[in-house]
Every structure is written in C-alpha cells, then in structure tokens.
Amino acid sequence: MRTILFLLQKEFLQIFRNRLMLPVIFVLPLVQLLILVHAATLEMKKIDLVVVNRDLSTWSGRLAQKFTASPFFRVQDAGNNQEAAQELLRKGQADMVMVIPAGFERNMMREGEESVQWLVDAINGTTAGLSYAYASAILADFHRELLQETGYSAGMDLPSGINVRERYWYNPKLNYKIFMIPGIMVLLVTIIGMFLSALNLVREKELGTIEQINVTPIRKYQFIIGKLIPFWVIALFDLSVGLTIGYFLFNMPILGSLPVLFAFASLYLMVILGLGLFISTMASNQQQVMFIGFFFIIVFILMSGIFTSTETMPAWARTVNIINPLAYFMRVIRMIILKGSGLTDIGREMIAIGIYAVLAMGLAVWRYRKVT
Amino acid sequence: MAAHNTPVIDVKEMTKTFGSFVANDRLTFRVERGEIFGFLGANGAGKTTAVRILCGLSAPTSGQITVAGYDVWTQSEQIKRNIGYMSQRFSLYEDITVYENIRLFGGIYGLSRRQIRERAGELLGRLGLENQRDTLIASLPLGWRQKLAFSIAIIHRPGIVFLDEPTGGVDPITRRQFWDLIYETAQSLITVFVTTHYMDEAEYCDRLCVMDEGRIVAMDTPYRLKQQYGAQDMNEVFIKIARKEI
C-alpha cells in the first residue's frame, strides 16, 4: 500500500507538471461536448428541396408554399425546368426534387387525387427515408386542407381514419442533444482513460525508466494500480464536468441516481484502463499503442449503440457486443440519466461490467512482465 | 584484493540465446564481496545481456546462477531487494525533481519517511547537490545525473550494485569523479559489478573479465592481464585479444 502511495505521488506530479496534460484533462471534455453535441445529430433540418412546378396554378403554388414554410426544408424554385432540377441533384446541391405535374389543380378538383413525382438523393438511405417521410407528412396535411376547403369532408362519406396521438416517453420533445450528451460522455471518458493510461505506461518503456522500476522488488499489481488510479480519477472528474455541462448548458435532465451512475462508471473505467494497460504491456512504443488502441476503440464505438440502436443489429453483432464495454455503459448511462433507472434495472449490466473489470485488470497485471 | 570467501555472485555455465543468436555462451565466474568487478568488451559482446540476467530483468536460457545467495531462477524478487542497478539508458524520471526521485525510489525500496529524508540529505551533501534539491532532472548536466542515478541506485544500501556502462557519453574528468564515487562505495563493502568499453575505466577495476562474441576470453586483475599479454596498458591488451593474437 505504501509503495502504491509513492507511485501515485510521482504520477500526479508528472501529470500536473506536464503542460500538455492539463488542457487534455480540462479543455478536451468541454470542446468535445460543445462541438459534438451540435454536430453529431440525426435531426433533419434544411433539406434542400427543388420544386419543379409545371402547373402554375393556385394550388400548386400553395403546395410549394407549404414546403417553404416548413423548418425542415430549404426550397429552391426551378420553375418549369426539370432538367435544371435534376442537374442540381446530380451535383449534390439538392437532396430532393418535387415535380408538380401540369394539370395538378384541375385533376385534384375533378378526381380528388393526383400524383406528384419525387426524386430523392438516396446515397445516405437513412436521410433519404427520413426526408421522404417528412415530405409525405406535409403532403398529407395539404391534402386534408384541400378536402376541408372543397367541402368533401362535410358532404361525402370519407373514412375518418385512425387518429394517432403520440406521447414520447423519456425524451418528450424528441430532443436529439439530450440523447447524444450521455453518449458523447461515454466516448470522452473512454478515450481519455484508455489512451492516457496506455500511452503513459508505454512511454516508460520508451524512456527506459521502467527498467529501473522492474529492478526493484515492487509487486506487479502495485505498479499496475499505480498507473491505473491517476487516470481513473481524471476520467471520473471529466465525467463530472460532462454532467455539469449537460445539466446547465443543455438542460439535460438527470432523472436517475448519480451515485449509481458513478458506481457503474468506476467499474467501467477499470475495464477501459485495464484494457489500455494490457495493450501497452504488449506494445513497445507509442505508435503501436495508438494503432492497436484505435482499432479496438473504433470497432467498439461504432458497435456501442451511440448512433444506432444495438437491438436492431444482426445477431452476430449483438453477440460481439457482449465483450464491448462501451455498449454496456452507453445503455446504462442513458437509462440512468434519461429514464431514471435504478440499481435494480441495471443490475445485470453492473454484474457483467464488474466481472469484466476483474478480468481486464487481471490481464494487465498478468501480462506486465518484470522479467523478459 | 578482496580476501572474502563467500562469492556474492556465482555463475556457472550461464547461457542466453535469442533464437539462433548466442548472446552469452556458457559464462562461468565468481565475484567476491567488496570487489570492483569489470566486464569489458566491445559493443555487442554480451555484457549488457549478462548484467540484465544477474539483475533479474531477463531470464537466462540455462545455467546455475546465484546473486547475493539467491537463485535467479526462483528467487529473483529476493535478489531485487539486495541489489542496485543503474543502466546506460538513462534511468531517473526527468520530469520530476532530484528530491522527488530520491523519495520515489526510497519509498519503493521500503525506507521510512525519516530514512528517506536523512539519506537524501546525506546523498545531496556528498554530491554537493544541496542547491539542486528541487531542480528537475531534465535541467541537470549529464555527469551530475549519472552520479545522482548511481547514488539513488544504492539508496537502500544493497550488497551489490550493477552498473551497465554507467559513464557513457561523459568526459574523462567526470568519469574520474564518478569512479571516485565508486571507490568510496566499494570501501563500505558494497560489491560493484560494472560493464564498460572504456579502457581507462577497466584499469580501475579489481578484477576484469574480457568478453568477446558472447564468451569470456580472459579473466584476471588488470595488472596480470597486462603481464600476460606483454602490454603497456589495457588498451593494448584489448586490441591483442580482439585480434586473437594469443
């Protein structure tokens, strides 16, 4: 225990004397949250829509007007020129083209129906689908207005349809930022924790100072714990900074219990730091650590469910996620913060991450060799 | 020289191979208590490999080896309690101060806070570094750092200290001062095991072991080696050995 204290004293001295480290610890979380929360969004705003109006009637004008009025669309008028509109789509300056055919108003009056053509840039299938869904909603709305005005609904026997009223739970305003903040905090503490600890240990190898440690009667677990605790403290500190920013700047509600969140985060960070140190016991320089670390981190992040739901992933991916520590924390942090889940709701994850922590730490201690 | 009977280092048939490369080929030697024992050889002769094995930093391929009475195969942690080690690769933490380094290693070796304070004061006094107590190692000249590294390596008063090319890159005057420090240490019956490729350093040793391509090619006092090879100084001895004139 005493030995560990001497090691910790040295680590903290080194960290706080390093002019580059302090910005990494204090500024990085701020910047990441402020920028990424705004940038990493799936919300669709300002879809570039080009309208080709071949009808030039009152109604076709009103239809185009409805899109202009919507916050989701940025409308460009191509007049009658479909070629020009398609050219814009090709150049990527437009996301969608709506072609209102000639005779639109007349047919609507007579038949009560008419077709509108949509051309959608579907390189990103998700965006294309969402844009189309928004557009359809506006069209349906427009149709309803027309029916009311022309008195169809009063006199004729129109099916009233099923009236759907949504209530969204846990994030009633469907605020994407509130969904993203906890996710970004997971990334933040993971990257900080894993890379700071791993780079720190391997740097001792590069400088040769680790030899001087290995020639002392120090125990392996003492050395690993001495390397772990400083970055564990820093990562937990950064988590607190993140929560504070989320709460005050983005009005993110914190429904669940903070002690439960921190308890889980503490175990989670042992996994991450353990893995980071494990990587650095195998690597012989900082480049190797970066390459191996990035490989795992990127796979883990993309599979963690930060953007896409893990439940909709194929079965094999869900199986892989059993060993993905990020997937656990991503789920748990959102459950606790946004849903108010308690210890009983996340018990399973807590036990899993606890076992994982023991394994990761064990691996690091086992793989650290005083004798080569 | 050292007339003590129990060898502090006893090596029989020590071999270390890296794949097909034989770094140490059946080395056999003994080092007596209080001796300054030198390993002399060109770069790549296998000196560093041998020291690393004796310190428990590297596992031998085969051989019977005891250091301070402990077996390197099974008791490497006991060995580590009883030795000091300073290597050519610079071994103090450069981004913390002189005193912080002393405190760290004193702490790791289990000295009490009071012992650390006392020995730090003593050590800084002996080296004349009292005013540098709170200087970062990075801003100390190389010669001072090496003296400091040596003194910290023996902060826990070990029976043996291993020095792996301790004076690499410093001028002859600083080297001379460093050796004064080694002599002082050896007087307090610490055994000094040193590797070098500087011939003037070889002259300072009580006994020398000359290595070439992983093998011991000569072992004796500098005086007798010179006699044996009919040489004026160690440099000549070394060149004759290297050219395999005998």
Image: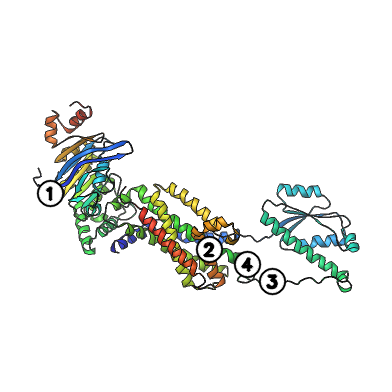
The residue under label 1 is B187
> In front: A321, or B119?
A321
Q: Are dots 2 and 4 on a single chain? A: yes
Q: Are dots 4 and 1 on a single chain? A: no
- Residue A175's tag is 4
Amino acid at the residue labelled 2 = Met
Q: Position of residue B170 (x, y in %)?
A: 26, 41
Q: Position of residue B70 (x, y in %)?
A: 19, 51
Q: Is residue A148 above or below residue A319?
A: below
Amino acid at the residue labelled 4 = Asn
> What separation in Å lies between label 3 and label 4 (alpha carbons)?
15 Å
Kind of element beneath mark 3? loop
Amino acid at the residue labelled 1 = Gln
Kind of element beneath mark 2? helix
Residue A45 visible to an observer of this rendering? yes
The residue under label 3 is A166
Mark toward the viewer: 3 or 4: 3
The residue under label 2 is A330
